[in-house]
Amino acid sequence: MVGAQDGPLNPPGKGRTVMRERIVELELKFTEQQRLLQELSDVVYAQGQSLERLEHELAIMNQKLAAMEPGLVDSSAVERPPHF
């Protein structure tokens, strides 16, 4: 790393101080990334739970629709028009 080493332009120990500061900064960024990753994971999990619930509700509605008596369903939606 240029400029971070001890030498005539940098007093002894300054390079180590700069390196420590950079390490602390990287650790802070890493911690923030971990937090964001956990937050996104929680959101994905919640969406998966919602999707499962909605799929279950849809299956129940499909079963109810299939069990309905034919007279309850609009016959024009079931019958083909005469030109077919």
Image (cartoon, rainbow, N blue to C red):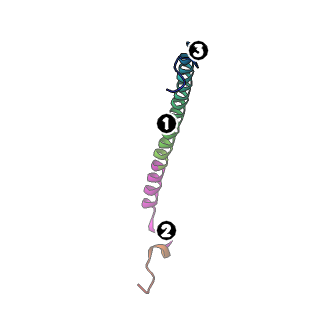
Q: Which residue is mark 2?
A: 73
Instruction: Return the disc, 1 or 3, that comes first in the chain's sequence.
Output: 3
| Numbered label tally | 3
Tell me which amino acid carries mark 1. Answer: Ser
Tell me which amino acid carries mark 3. Answer: Pro
Q: Is residue 45 magenta?
A: no
Residue found farthest to the left: 84
Stretch in magenta: 55-74
| Residue 75: % across, % down | 48, 74
| Residue 47: % across, % down | 51, 43
Relative vertical location of residue 46 with respect to residue 23 in this rendering, above or below: below
Q: CA distance from mark 1 to mark 3?
A: 46 Å
Near mark 2 (Cα within 10 A), the count class, few <14, some 14-19 or many ≥20, is few
> Mark number for residue 11?
3
Q: Magenta stretch: dominant SS?
A: helix
Front position among marks 2 and 1: 1
Tell me which amino acid carries mark 2. Answer: Val
Near mark 1 (Cα within 10 A), the count class, few <14, some 14-19 or many ≥20, is few
| Residue 63: % across, % down | 43, 56
Relative vertical location of residue 39 with respect to residue 12 in this rendering, above or below: below
Q: Is residue 71 magenta?
A: yes
Residue at 51% in and 30% down: 34
Q: Which residue is mark 1?
A: 41
Q: Secondary structure at mark 3?
A: loop
